[in-house]
Amino acid sequence: MVDALFASSEALLVMRNTIARSPREAAPVSSVDDARASYVFARFRRQWAALTGADIGADKRRVVERRLGPVMRAHDVSDLFELTLLIERNGNEALIEEAIDAMTAGETSFFRDRAPFEAFRARILPELMAARGRERRLRIWCAAVSTGQEAYSLAMMLDEAARELRGWSLEILGTDISGAAIETARKGIYTHLEVQQGLSTTHLLRYFHREEENWRVNEHLRARVAFGRFNLLSSPAELGAFDVILCRNAVTSFAPEAKRGVLERLAGLLAEDGYLFLGDAETVDEAAPCFIPTAHPSVWRRRARPRPRLSLV
Ligand SMILES: C[S@@+](CC[C@H](N)C(=O)[O-])C[C@H]1O[C@@H](n2cnc3c(N)ncnc32)[C@H](O)[C@@H]1O
């Protein structure tokens, strides 16, 4: 079936005609195979970028095949071409979700890079508290939260400020494109190695308990964070406005156009005086007009939107 689909592809026919104009001029089989593989991988990369935003390098075919091999075998998909067609036609939701889980690198840790969290606690939280004194409400979104450590780090910081925040409504939402990552985040169960990354002994003892050989976030902290699946390429309007958005180390591999789209949508969701946190090596360059730099290099403040002018006729 796959070969039939492949043979019906217009692009492939063009390519075949170019490679072998007549039977006598036929190119060696290996170069035809190479051309087919390059064509299929280029089509896969385009499709993957449309699905997730990630711009996979043209030299990453073997890496992709290695990561997706087990998923394709489990779903009886014979090769990358069949998988690409299924993604194009949105033909198998479970398969696509598993492919996303296999492809997304969810590297993260508690209080990752530390300095942005210190900036949040020392400057941004007090400033927002002063500005929101009347409504007493703060909404924070970790927009590519992976397995949850980033959101729980913020929850611990807010818990430590509990006295100042008494009577406030605090919401922390953590989302990610990977369902498997979100499942782990919801459970809040981490290995010994994971809790050793970024977590102080005080935090570990105050906010975690042992569960068999792992550590689990205490119930009262888990209850303060909501997790869900969300693709940054979708429209986030239904999530409402946020005072702080963290989108750290997620759009690094996006093509500039896709990154610009994500940053503009995030700006649209930030409150007038809201803040955006990116990863340490990331910038807002693609959507610079939407943001103002702050004293902290990976934190931006949203630029106020120009008010529509009233024209009197
Ligand atoms: C390297 S992790 C970063 C986790 C955390 N923000 C941090 O900095 O430690 C990147 C995360 O971005 C997520 N991601 C990638 N593309 C995404 C998309 N289109 N929508 C939502 N999440 C995405 C991945 O699943 C992964 O969990």
Image (cartoon, rainbow, N blue to C red):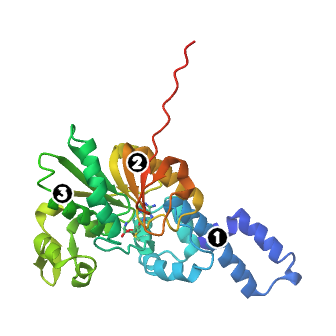
Q: Nearer the viewer, mark 2 or mark 3?
A: 3
Binning the other alpha carbons within 10 Å of mark 2 as few (below 14), some (14 to 19) or many (20 upward) gives some
Q: Please state if 19 lies on the left or on the right of 229 as rendered.
A: right
- Mark 2 or mark 3: which comes first in sequence? 3
Q: Where does residue 139 sit, x and y in percent of width and height?
A: 28, 49
Image quadrant occupied by the C terminus: top right
Binning the other alpha carbons within 10 Å of mark 3 as few (below 14), some (14 to 19) or many (20 upward) gives some
* Residue 146 in view of the camera: no
Question: Mark 2: which amino acid?
Answer: Pro
The extreme top residue here reads 313
248 or 50, which is in the foreground? Answer: 248
Q: CA distance from mark 3 to mark 1?
A: 43 Å
Give the residue number, with chain letter if any, for mark 1: 42
**CB of mark 3 within 8 Å of CB of mark 1?**
no
Question: Mark 3: which amino acid?
Answer: Arg
Give the residue number, with chain letter if any, for mark 3: 224
